[in-house]
Amino acid sequence: MLNKKRPFGNDLISGRILKNLASLGSLQILNFLIPMVLSPYLVRVIGLENFGRVAVAQAIISYLNIITDFGFYITATKEISQNRENKKVVGAIYNEVLTTKIYLLVLTFLFLSGFVALFDETDTNPLLYIFSFTMVIGQALFPIWLFHGLEDMKYITLVNSASKVVSLLLIFFFVTETTDYIYVNFFLGVGTILAAIASFYFVKSKYGLVYKPVAITQVRHHLKEGKDIFVSNFAVNLYTNSNILILGLFAPVQIVGYYSVAEKVMNAVRQLLGVYFQAIYPSMCNLVSKTKKELIEVTLRVHLPFSLGIMFLCSGINFFSEELTQYFSGTYTQEINYLIRLLSFVPFIVALNIPSNQLLLIYGYKETYRTTLLLGSLLNLLLNFVLSYFYLAQGTGITVILTEVFITVSLLTVLEKKNPVYSLLFKKGT
């Protein structure tokens, strides 16, 4: 039988973690609703082709976001969580991580400027990519890792909600014709920048932390700690965002637009997974000293119901695919309907790997974690180039499913080989 003495699952339900989940959950409702409002509007105003162009720009920007983040949402969150009572240490981490991000921000802008110079202006306006850089600035400067480490999610909910509403209103006011597609990502980034600016005032007033730049020599520790997570995140980004880029090599822009609509529906659900991961991760870091039986209890009490909820939501998307197609595109398009149904259960597959994903990081198997995700990315690239070439958007969708199944199975297998946890469920006396 599992240990009945004050299991962590009870603490999770009754304590601070429940507040974190509630705060981030309410934010995620907004994150879920905004694409439901924004995507149909953009498809109607800028057209499917330009909608596809905006999606391609977002895919490229996502790589720059990975560089400026450099794994800090994992490493810095963990360090702050474990030192939250020591203001001096938290302050040092705050200054060092932000300084590192600013250096990386300059580097990524130089890279983007050189990259855009190679573009053919007759197909896509280069300003789309330059304006999209506001999304990188906002994400780099917003210290979400600090609030996650301190488990103070209430502020994130308020500020992020306000910033998203601001971005939505700016798009409704200023994106009103086809050529305005170049401003969509710009306004999405403006909201995040405003949230980042507000966060500096909040951090100062509540925690007494004032950002002070540090020398580059003082950030080497964070670069070293974050390198494995950075490579892992880059690998994840490679197989989640390269799909549209590779599809664009073989398919007309309209087909890319079809796939982008279906992917937006899937990503609306996948954002729930990201919020759940962030809410539970700081406490999981502090759970490392507990017994494996208590880890299993967390799975049974928290991860299992969450995964079942995601499965139910995915089933709803599959069942109402025709209605979603009509809503997002303004007309029934068979290709979009098929792609929505094809991708509908991808979030559930991803949800299944969250426990093993977190435990590999918490137990310190960062290199193994990195290798697993790199293999998944390699598989994704190989399958994508072959299947997208022959089957276009359908091939891209099949690639996504096969890649996520491979990664979910691999992460669980690696965890059980390195440090068996969930296999104890099947052992007598557990």
Image: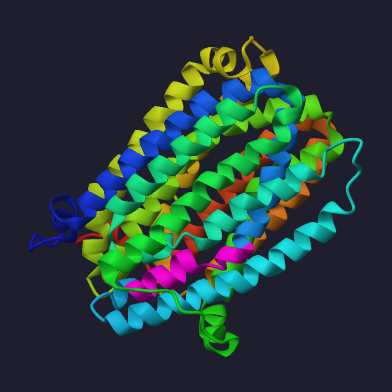
Front residue of 295/150: it is 150
Identified at 59% across, 21% down, the residue is 41
Q: Is residue 11 above or below residue 300?
A: below
User: Residue 138 is drawn in which quadrant?
Assistant: bottom right
Q: Main secondary structure of the magenta part?
A: helix
Front residue of 133/429: it is 133
Q: Position of residue 164 (x, y in %)?
A: 46, 39
Q: In the visual, does 401 lie left or right of 163?
A: right
Q: Is residue 90 magenta?
A: no
Identified at 33% across, 60% down, the residue is 202
Front residue of 19/207: it is 207
Q: Is residue 78 magenta?
A: yes
User: On the rendered image, what quadrant is the N terminus found in?
Assistant: bottom left
Q: Is residue 309 above or below residue 336?
A: below
Q: In the visual, does 163 lie left or right of 81?
A: right
Q: Position of residue 424 (x, y in %)?
A: 30, 61
Instruction: Point out the stretch of residues depicted in magenta.
Output: 67-80
Residue 217 seen? yes
Residue 371 seen? no
Q: Which residue is farthest bottom?
A: 217
Q: Which residue is farthest left?
A: 5
Identified at 76% across, 65% down, the residue is 110
Q: In the visual, does 88 lie left or right of 10?
A: right
Q: Position of residue 244 (x, y in %)?
A: 72, 40
Q: Position of residue 307 (x, y in %)?
A: 36, 41
Q: Is residue 23 above or below residue 36?
A: below
Q: Is residue 127 above or below residue 53?
A: below
User: On the rendered image, what quadrant is the C terminus found in?
Assistant: bottom left
